[in-house]
Amino acid sequence: MERTKGQKILEIVASAFGVTGLFITALGYPNIGFMVALCASTLYAVYAFKTKQYGILTSSIIYAIVEIVGIIHWTFGNGK
């Protein structure tokens, strides 16, 4: 399946958000890192839907759930 230019750009932007989120988390700011990673998961979900890759869509939803739990833990829970 050939991807459009917009889909390729979306994939690159989602990857950049994902790596940035990991980097921010590794620097010691997990609440912000999880929020950036949640944006990446959202972009990956849009990409997966547009390219009809439902396995990626499913995994991006699972990652989003994990990131939401991380945000709650590090922002409101004992992780502070």
Image (cartoon, rainbow, N blue to C red):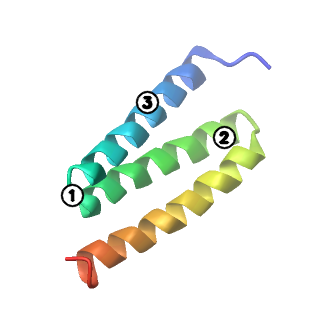
Where, by quadrant of the figure, is residue 2 drawn? top right
**Label 2 environment density (alpha carbons within 10 Å; few <14, some 14–19, many ≥20):** many
CA gap between label 2 and label 3 equals 13 Å
Relative image position of residue 52 (x, y in whole percent):
76, 38
Relative image position of residue 42 (x, y in whole percent):
50, 50
68 w.r.t. 22: above or below: below
Give the residue pinned by disc 2: 48
**Label 1 environment density (alpha carbons within 10 Å; few <14, some 14–19, many ≥20):** some
Relative image position of residue 9 (x, y in whole percent):
50, 22
Amino acid, disc 2: Ala
Identify the element where label 1 is drawn.
loop
Give the number of the disc on residue 29: 1
Amino acid, disc 1: Tyr
Between circles 3 and 1, the one closer to the viewer is 1
**N-terminal label among 2 and 1:** 1
CA gap between label 2 and label 1 equals 28 Å
Identify the element where label 3 is drawn.
helix
Judged left or right of residue 22, residue 28 is: left
**N-terminal label among 2 and 3:** 3
Quadrant housing the N terminus: top right
